[in-house]
């Protein structure tokens, strides 16, 4: 199962369409190129799927989504494990 997971932007790279995003303590680079028309900044929340930020969301929606995903149990845990092992250069 593939899930879209909320993450908080920690840093945006100036020279590439990438951002460092924190997802429940796991930090990874995420491609933000699909959101090039959004004004993104550190502290913003995005919905991430397969290494791409798909949409900008507000913090309340992000927290509600994380609570719901955590309730999925193993599927959520598997997705977080996959995120830990992923890498975008």
Image (spheres, helix red, strand yellow):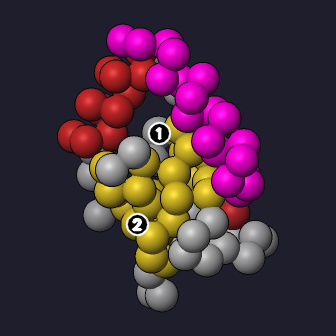
The residue positioned farthest toward the bottom in the image shown: 14
Q: Looking at the image, is mark 2 or mark 1 nearer the viewer?
A: 2
Q: Position of residue 51 (x, y in %)?
A: 45, 47
Above or below: residue 62 compared with residue 10: above
Question: What residue do we see at 51% from left, 51% from top?
Answer: 7
Mark 2 and mark 1 in contact? Answer it, CB < 8 Å.
no
Q: Mark 2 or mark 1, which has the lower sequence index?
A: 2
Q: Position of residue 75 (x, y in %)?
A: 41, 14
In magenta segment, residue 19? no
- Number of callouts: 2
Locate residue 56 relative to residue 67 in the image: left or right: right
Span colored in magenta: 55-74
Locate residue 67 relative to residue 76 in the image: left or right: right
Dot 2 falls on a residue whose secondary structure is strand
Locate residue 8 relative to residue 36 in the image: left or right: left
Location of mark 2 (residue) = 20
Above or below: residue 83 compared with residue 3: below
Question: What residue do we see at 41% from left, 13% from top?
Answer: 73
How crowded is the residue under tag 2: few (<14 C-alpha within 10 Å), some, or many (20+)?
some
Q: Is residue 49 visible?
A: yes
Q: Quadrant of residue 81?
A: top left
Location of mark 1 (residue) = 50
Q: Position of residue 14 (x, y in %)?
A: 48, 87
- Cα separation, mark 2 vs mark 1, equals 14 Å
Question: What residue do we see at 61% from left, 42% from top?
Answer: 63
Dot 1 falls on a residue whose secondary structure is loop
| Magenta stretch: dominant secondary structure | helix
In magenta segment, residue 58? yes
Above or below: residue 16 compared with residue 29: below
């Amino acid at each position: 199962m593939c899930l879209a997971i909320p993450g908080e932007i920690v840093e945006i790279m100036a020279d590439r369409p990438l951002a460092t995003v924190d997802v429940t303590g796991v930090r990874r680079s995420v491609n933000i190129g699909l959101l090039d028309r959004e004004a993104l900044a550190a502290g913003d929340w995005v919905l991430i799927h397969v290494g791409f930020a798909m949409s900008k969301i507000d913090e309340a929606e992000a927290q509600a989504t994380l609570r719901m995903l955590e309730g999925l149990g193993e599927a959520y845990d598997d997705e977080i494990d996959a995120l830990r092992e992923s890498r975008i250069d």
